[in-house]
Amino acid sequence: MGTPTTFKRKEVKYFITYDQRIKLQTLMEEHMSPDSFGRSTIMNIYYDTDNKELIRHSMEKPVYKEKLRVRSYGTATPESTVFVELKKKYKGIVYKRRVSMSQGDAKLWLERDDMPPKDSQIIREIDYFTHVYTIKPAVLLSYEREAFFGKEDPEFRMTFDDAILWRDYDICLCKGAYGKAILPPKTQLLEVKAGMGMPMWLTKFFSENNIFATSFSKYGKAYTQMIQKNKENIERRNRYSA
């Protein structure tokens, strides 16, 4: 089966401690299988307008929101395959459209308006988005991920992310994973992704361990820290010039 290019699903996020992760992992052995890629480094470039219109709108928690990113698995070269993803959320349901191409072609397309060699409906959708908004690379987010899928329902997925880092400089998938951390200490981010409902065994585990769903955006958290960093830099310059 090829790599999916469209998704429609519910995505729910949780902060869990390492101890909770160990308990959950034991339970998952009966119901889940590890992804064939194992633990992998995921790197994303998020694109936005000069005034960060997309993330500011997203953080207002509207009924509908959208974002555009380019993802690589590990550090990329110009020839590496990357995924250009248009992610939309409407009334809590996530819709994702994505296409794969070389990093070089993705960069030419999104930053120089050179269309990719191959045409498709999804490419035209993403291209339309890039012309509605005047976008450029805004932030690079990287993290270590372990993914699992359901033994009975392969569309049901759980992912654990840690070492989530961001930077608003050196925004290139070719320069490795480094930057400022955004997760609370000694925690991981668990994402549960399901087209249907959540299984009872998992709901019971969350209830018994007082684990509750949280609203958390990696890019949103990075943007908040970015604003704080800019504010501190301005205050520092003002002190030196006084």
Image (spheres, grey):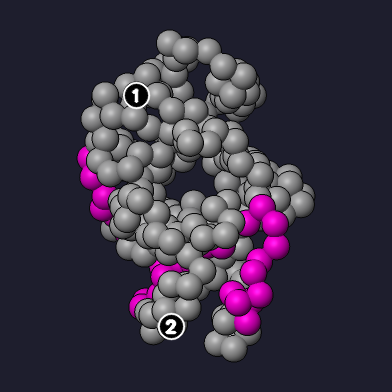
Q: Residue at x 57, y 17 (%)?
A: 120
Residue 59 percent location from the top left of the image: 63, 54
Whether residue 123 sits left or right of residue 117 in the image: it is: right
Crowdedness near tag 1: few (<14), some (14–19) or many (≥20) residues, C-alpha within 10 Å:
some
Q: Amino acid at mark 2?
A: Lys
Whether residue 193 sits left or right of residue 227 in the image: it is: right
Q: Is residue 114 above or below residue 59?
A: above
Q: Amino acid at mark 1?
A: Ser
Task: Indicate yes or no whether the magenta region holds residue 73.
Answer: no
The magenta segment is 175-204
Circle 1 sits on which residue?
Answer: 102
Q: Is residue 87 above or below residue 36?
A: above
Could you tell me which secondary element the residue under label 1 belongs to? strand
Marks 1 and 2: which is nearer the front? Answer: 2
The answer to whether residue 197 is visible is yes
Labelled pair 1, 2 in contact (Cβ < 8 Å):
no
Residue 112 percent location from the top left of the image: 42, 16
The answer to whether residue 225 is visible is no
Q: Residue at x 61, y 41 (%)?
A: 7
Front-lying residue, 194 or 52: 194
Q: Quadrant of residue 74?
A: top left
Whether residue 72 sits left or right of residue 207 in the image: it is: left
For marks 1 and 2 on the same chain, the one whose residue lies earlier in the sequence = 2
